[in-house]
Image: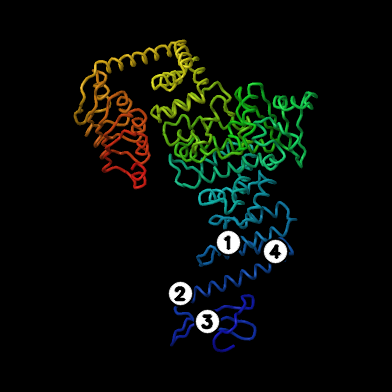
Amino acid sequence: PTGYMENSISYSAIEDVQLLSWENAPKYCLQLTIPGGTVLLQAANSYLRDQWFHSLQWKKKIYKYKKVLSNPSRWEVVLKEIRTLVDMALTSPLQDDSIHQAPLEIVSKLLSENNNLTTQDHESIIVAIAPLLENNHPPPDLCEFFCKHCRERPRSMVVIEVFTPVVQRILKHNMDFGKCPRLRLFTQEYILSLNELNAGMEVVKKFIHSMHGPTGQCPHPRVLPNLVAVCLAAIYSCYEEFINSRDNSPSLKEIRNGCQQQCDRKPNLPLRLLHTSPDLVSQEATLTESRLKPVIVTSNEIHVEVERNNTANQKMTAGVGNDSEPNLIDCLMVSPTCSTISIELSPQADRILGCYVEILKMLSDYDDWRPALASLLQPIPFPKEALAHEKFTKELKYVIQRFAEDPRQEVHSCLLSVRAGKDGWFQLYSPGGVACDDDGELFASMVHILMGSCYKTKKFLLSLAENKLGPCMLLALRGNQTMVEILCLMLEYNIIDNNDTQLQIISTLESTDVGKRMYEQLCERQRELKELQRKGGPTRLTLPSKSTDADLARLLSSGSFGNLENLSLAFTNVTSACAEHLIKLPSLKQLNLWSTQFGDAGLRLLSEHLTMLQVLNLCETPVTDAGLLALSSMKSLCSLNMNSTKLSADTYEDLK
């Protein structure tokens, strides 16, 4: 051929590639030898010519290996060709992802088309391609092959020596398992194979520690989210068979209503509703009695039993006409007003569940991982079948306990629901919740830590009074100091309107020494408050600069300030903690907090109690949108100074 190239040349037709140059007039050319002649390719410089040269050589060899490995005859020859292919990829000067990915895809296709390989052949191929996996994710088909090897040969040294760095790289660098689910499945099978070794969970623990690193802060931000994603997928798989048969099992509404309309349900798979009494065929009695009998639902691996009692009947009957999907906790509660559900998994699923719940417990032991772990688990990302499984909730209790013991608000606040109307871990593990298996110890510790961060807000106390007053009184009766404090605060903030309930709370407090002492202190404070209001006092007060919370508390406790209307704390060192004393000033109308450390928590408390406040100066305070929005409930507020704060435009519009 002469002149310019008019037709393309296939890579398979290229017999040889050579570099050419002329001494007198250097032209950077490549010579391609093809059947019937040669072709010269001229580049602008030597760098571009060398790029073309190595690229053409690479492509030519790749086609050769594809052809050779597409029709394997002897596996000894195939293995030798694979090693040569890997060496070529490692020594190529080209810098491109496809240089290492192309050989992996060729081997992946080879393995997918040949299912009759021996275990020894498997391991030889894995060892041969191991150098390419150090800096590259395995393609999907290769992940399937690795998963199969982990399941069939979990104790193979290949798992430890070759797969470990591959999985470590996946956990450190993978950004989204949703785009490559087989990487997640391979990681899942690898961890299960580690658990099959003699040391079992000790090996898994060492692997988790190696992923975290020896320092107090893990240097790889993707490790924890990826590990949690693997754990969640593995736990989901344990209940997958039952989840897939949900159409053939009682729905949440049927569980709550006692499956009263059993004749309308026509399952495709076997479903047994066992009743012990033959009288249930009767018309009116059937509807009532069926709710009191056990309901058994079976599948291949999971057994669910739902039992009910008489006290649950009235609540269930009230919701029969409601077509909306019932609340999760309503369906899974174990208190006298709720149902009991027990689930049995197969031995294999039980081992998987035990392994991955144990990993979640390990993750919760690392201080730097705990905030992110709490945030990831706050939406309760588990199927309802898992939450109904006693073993699962009992094992997961350790993780929730770690959250409840952590003093950081970003951690223990995740015990509450992620949004209004949705249940959180606090509801699940409180008395009456499906996961509560103790006498309320975990509930008491959760309330204790949450009260510390919520600064005893009325909203939290109201929710306890509405939903958990009984457990609070029972624990207070047993001498729990946190619950005694809760009951005293309910009385102090007038949370309880019913006189009989107030008398019950007082009787509960007086039945223990700690309760009697705290109730007497409450009565003393109330008497002092009334005395303050009776005596009156100054209407204006200004604290000296650099005064502290302790100074303010000492001052307010030393005299009567029932008539105090104007208080200036400007340029002092007070913080949100002083809000507990400010809310006891019944006549306060003007408050100056200019250049103090008064923050969001204090604002929330003021907004709930100082309903008469008219003027508030927050200039140069660390308040944010979260606290400022709470001021929208202060209907008497006329003047608000927010200069030099972190106020956003949206919050400004909301406050207007």
Amino acid type at circle 2 is Tyr
Disc 4, SS: helix
Quadrant into which the N terminus falls: bottom right
Comparing labels 4 and 3, the label whose residue is closer to the camera: 3
Q: How crowded is mark 2: few (under 14 residues within 10 Å), some or many (20 or more)?
A: few
Q: Nearer the viewer, residue 97 or 321?
A: 321
Left or right of 608: which side holds 132?
A: right
First in residue order: circle 2 vs circle 1: 2
Quadrant in the rendering for residue 636: top left
Q: Distance between the residues labelled 2 and 1?
A: 24 Å
Q: Nearer the viewer, residue 465 or 319?
A: 319
Q: Distance between the residues labelled 4 and 3?
A: 35 Å
Residue annotated with mark 3:
41
Determine whether label 2 and label 3 are within 8 Å by CB. Answer: no
Q: Do the residues labelled 2 and 1 touch (CB within 8 Å)?
A: no
Category of crowding for the residue at label 4, using alpha-carbon neighbours closer than 10 angstroms: few (below 14), some (14–19), many (at least 20): few
User: In the picture shown, does residue 518 fall above or below 68?
Assistant: above
Q: Mark 4 points at which residue?
A: 77
Kindly report which numbered mark, 2 or 4, lies closer to the viewer in this rendering: 2
Which of disc 3 and disc 1 is earlier in sequence?
Answer: 3
